[in-house]
Structure formats: C-alpha cells, structure tokens
Image (cartoon, helix red, strand yellow):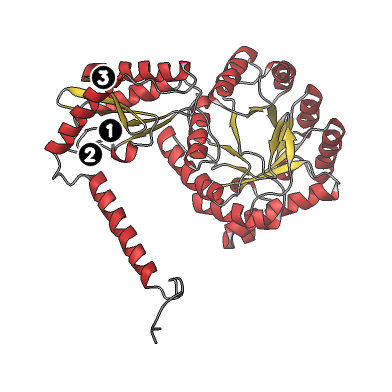
Amino acid sequence: MASQRQIHVGGVPIGGGAPVAVQTMTKTETADLQATMAQIRRVAEAGADIVRCAVPRDEDVEALKTIVRESPIPIIADIHFNYTLALKAIDAGAHCIRLNPGNIGGPDKVALVAEKARAAGVPIRIGVNSGSLPRHLHALERENSVEALVAAAVEFVELMESLDFTDFKVSIKSTNVPNTIASNRLLSERIPYPLHLGITEAGTKWSGSLKSSVGLGTLLADGIGDTIRISLSTFHAEEEVKVAWEILKALQLRDRGPVLIACPTCGRLQFDMDTVVAEIERRLEAYADPIEVAVLGCAVNGIGEASHADFGITGAKNEGLIFSRGRALRKVPQEQLVDTLFAEIDKYVKAGKRVAVDAGEAAKGAAWLEAIEAENAGEMTPERLAAAEKAAAAAEAAAEARLDETVSPTAGRRFTRS
Ligand code: SF4
C-alpha cells in the first residue's frame, strides 16, 4: 500500500504521493571535505535528490557544517550507536538524521534526539536491518524473519509516536530479496509513514544492480516505496544513482534524460553493435531531454518495433540508416552512423524538438530500406515472430469477443441461441 504521510528532507517531499526520490551515500571519509563535496557534486549531477553521509566521529560533524551549506542537495547524517552525534548533526544543520533506535542507547536517548529534531524541524529516518534486530525478537526471527523485521519496525514507530514525533520515514532492509519484498509489503499495510527501500549489501555493480532491480522494482511496481538507494560495492556513488534512475525510468515512475533501446542482436547482425551501443549510451549522457534512441543490429525487419523512437539507427551491407519516428532520414556509410545520429539529435534539440527532414536524403534512405526489406521478405526474425504472435492473439481475442453473447449487440437479432 502506498504511504499516506509526507515528510520533507530539505526541500524534497517524501511519501504521500510525491515522486520516488533517488538517494545514495557518500563513500569518502566525511571529514575529508574536499573529497566528500566532490562526490556529492557528482551524485547530484547524476540525479541524486538526497545524499547520506556517515557521521561516526566529531571531525565528521565539523565537516558536516560546511557540507550542508555547500551541498546542492539535502544531506542526511547517518548515525550509529552514539546519540550525541545525532544531536550534534542536527546542530550542524543536517536535513535529516538516519538512526536505528535499537542501537542508539535506549528509548531515553531516542527521546532526546526526537526532542531536538522536533525543535529544529528535522525529520528522522528510522532504519531497521535484519542483522541488528532487538534481542527479544531473536526467537521470532528464527521462526519467521519477515514478521520479526516488521515487528521491530512497528515497535520503533510506536516508540516515536509515544514521543509525539511523527516526522519520520522507515526502512527495513535485508540482504535477502524475497524477505525485503515480503517485509516491506507487510509494513506498508501496517503503517502510513513513507518507506525508504534498499537491499543491504547488494553486491557488485552487476549483481547488486540486478538484485536491487528485482527487489525494489517489485515493490515500486506495487506502489510501495518513497525513496530508494541502490547499494553497490563501488567507490563511485554516481553509479548507484544511475541504476536507481534506470529502475524508475523502466517503471515509468520518473523521467530523466534519454532512453536507449537496442535489439539483443542475433546472427543477422550487420555491424559492431556492442561498441556502437556503448558509445551511444556514453554520448547520450550529455543530453537532458527524454529522447528515445533505438539501435537495431540489422535492417532486415525494417524499422519495426522501433518506429516510435525519436531517433534510431540500423545497418546492412556496410551502410546504415538514420531514422526518426518511423521514417528514414538519411543513409550513410556505417562508420559515420554514430556521428550522423548525434548531428541529427543536435539539430532536433536546437530546433526546439523538431525533426529536420531533407526530402532528397530521406527518399534515398527509404528506398534503401525498402530494398533490404524486399530482399529479406521471407526471413522469420525474432521481431517478425513476435509481430505474428501478437497479430494472431489479437485475431483470437477479436473472434472470442464476437462470439460472446453477453457483449455482442442484440438489436435486430431474429433468433436467440439457447
Ligand atoms: S534480426 Fe532483430 S535481433 Fe537480429 S540483428 Fe536484426 S534487429 Fe537485431
């Protein structure tokens, strides 16, 4: 169930219908001001809405004062064990405090932090991890780890409510993807507060991205989750941000920058698509508009399912075609495909998102494409198979609809089936 409450971290609304916010965490020593600020600027540029910094020592609190002043995005201070650091981080101007009420020294220490946070108007993120549940829940954890995680989170929520503090969001995280999904689903039914989603210690860029996509994607598709963080074992926190955005874009929850679509390639491939796709992806990072760009490994199918793309390329016989929204734009030698594609995209952006068509070049490109399609008319490609299956399913559905007495029109009917 989607959250009903909304909080604000700096100027960023979280929960209660706000767009899902992208978070990450700096991996520098927070006290190393120069390195930390450089990383914060990189993650902000990559699209982070909020960033968390670890605050394990007084030196980090000192640095935090400058960081919150200079950061282009709100800062969450990550506190473990030492409640006095939470109090100091609030004084330093942190936009939010992340703590685990179970390891901060008891309810009276939590009360002190809540009191100061309330006075400063600073929200708190309550974090519960599968590795650090309170001792009285260990037996339940062995029996039903999902119930134990949710019980811990609900206990902490009740503690905060008893302190008359409701300006918080909650995260329950586990390294186990099914447990993360099940526990967040259950928790979303039990509390109205915003939820932060993440898979703890997800792994390397490859496996961690996949685990996070499965776990967070499943929850987000159900409308659960208000902020996300992808935890990857890389120093480059901006990579976490890029993965988070790809998940949100794939679910069409938020838009940011271009969308690249590419065929998976097969034995009909006509150019070095691996290199070309990687280069296009890299060059597209410089564009802010949500332009959709398609890369097809051969022109056997024509433009096919990429006909909706703003721009695309395909190739055959040492030549290639630039196309736009289902129409040929121009034919070029294959080695010029990428540069010409970007020249067309630049013209489009400059013209206020209008595609410039040179009629002569477009006609030459269309004729070239027609010839390739005609030459390969009998080929059963993956795309043609999919199109044939789709057409067959549509025909079957139409036939069923025609035979359905309850939905077919009856006006003027002379006989009724018994
Ligand atoms: S047939 Fe389809 S999958 Fe194979 S190279 Fe051509 S466009 Fe790509």
Q: Are marks 1 and 2 in contact (CB under 8 Å)?
A: yes
Residue 74: image location, x then y, percent: 69, 26
Q: Percent position (x, y) of residue 209?
A: 45, 38
Residue type at the position of mark 3: Gly
Residue where numbered disc 1 is placed: 296
User: Contact, CB < 8 Å: mark 1 with mark 3?
Assistant: no
Q: Which residue is mark 2?
A: 301
The residue positioned 70% from the left and 21% from the top of the image is 60
Judge from the rendering whether residue 5 lies leftward or rightward of residue 351; answer left or right.
right
| Residue hosting label 3 | 360
In the depicted view, which residue is nearer to us: 387 or 114? 387
For label 3, being within 8 Å of ligand 1 is answered no
Q: Which of label 1 and label 2 is nearer to you? A: 2
Residue 7: quadrant of the picture:
top right
Near mark 1 (Cα within 10 A), the count class, few <14, some 14-19 or many ≥20, is: many
In the depicted view, which residue is nearer to us: 251 or 389?
Answer: 389
Q: Is mark 1 within 8 Å of ligand 1?
A: yes
Residue drawn 24% across the image and 24% down it = 363
Q: Position of residue 234 (x, y in %)?
A: 48, 28
In percent of width and height, residue 8 lies at 74, 35
Q: Is residue 218 visible?
A: yes
